Image (cartoon, grey):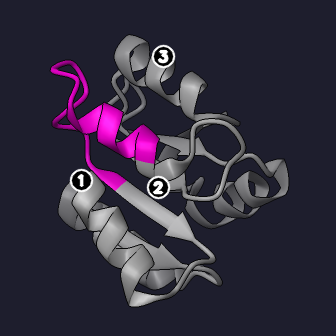
Amino acid sequence: MNNHGKAKLLVVDDEYFNFTLYAQALGQQYQLQYVDSGKQCLNEAINQHPDAIMLDVCMPGLDGFDTCRMLKNTPETQDIPVLMISGLESPHAKQQGYAAGCDAYFVKPLSFNELLDSLQTLI
């Protein structure tokens, strides 16, 4: 939690438009920070230690599965809850997400009520 009493949420998505949607839906309850790549996510997670990470799966370079795996295998970040968000809705994709170590897997379009419930449970 930061000094404003809001939990810090790191949003990782290569599409800034998605961040604007999350900011509108979650900005009242959470302090949101945005990065647009898996590599930036790893740096910010270590330096800022957010309360949770919302991680897009399909990104160029380091995708969400690899980023999650790295987060969960790094001592400084392994306890941060990771919520994966993806357009991939197949059971195989979800299984890949959980195998990578995510704490929750959401398929776009998101139900923000479900997302909020999950965040409250995990933080």
Identity, as a three-letter code, of the amino acid under mark 1: Gly
Give the residue displayed 67% in from the left and 54% down from the top.
Answer: 23
Residue drawn at x 42%, y 30% as measured from the top left? 4
For the residues labelled 1 and 2, say whether their Cβ atoms are less than 8 Å apart: no
The answer to which quarter of the image holds residue 88 is: bottom right
- On screen, residue 108 versus residue 102, left or right, reads right
Q: Earlier in the sequence, mark 3 or mark 1?
A: 3
Question: Could you say whether the residue bearing mark 2 is in a helix, strand or loop?
Answer: loop
Residue found at x 19% / y 33%: 78
Q: Is residue 52 above or below residue 71?
A: below
First of labels 1, 2 by sequence position: 2
- Image position, residue 84 (x, y; %): 44, 61
Q: Amino acid at mark 3?
A: Asn
Q: Would you say residue 65 sits in the magenta stretch?
A: no
Q: Nearer the viewer, mark 3 or mark 1?
A: 1
* Circle 1 SS class: loop
Relative vertical location of residue 7 with respect to residue 27 in this rendering, above or below: above
Q: Provide the residue span drawn in magenta.
A: 66-82
| Residue 122 image offset from top left, x and y in percent | 21, 58
Badge 2 is on which residue? 29
Q: Nearer the viewer, mark 3 or mark 2?
A: 3
| Marks 3 and 1 in Cβ contact (< 8 Å) | no
Indicate the quadrant containing the N terminus: top left, top right, bottom left or bottom right. top left
**Circle 3 Cα neighbour tier, 10 Å, few/some/many (<14 / 14–19 / ≥20):** few
Q: Which mark is residue 93?
A: none
Compared to 74, does 117 lie above or below?
A: below
**Disc ID at residue 101:** 1
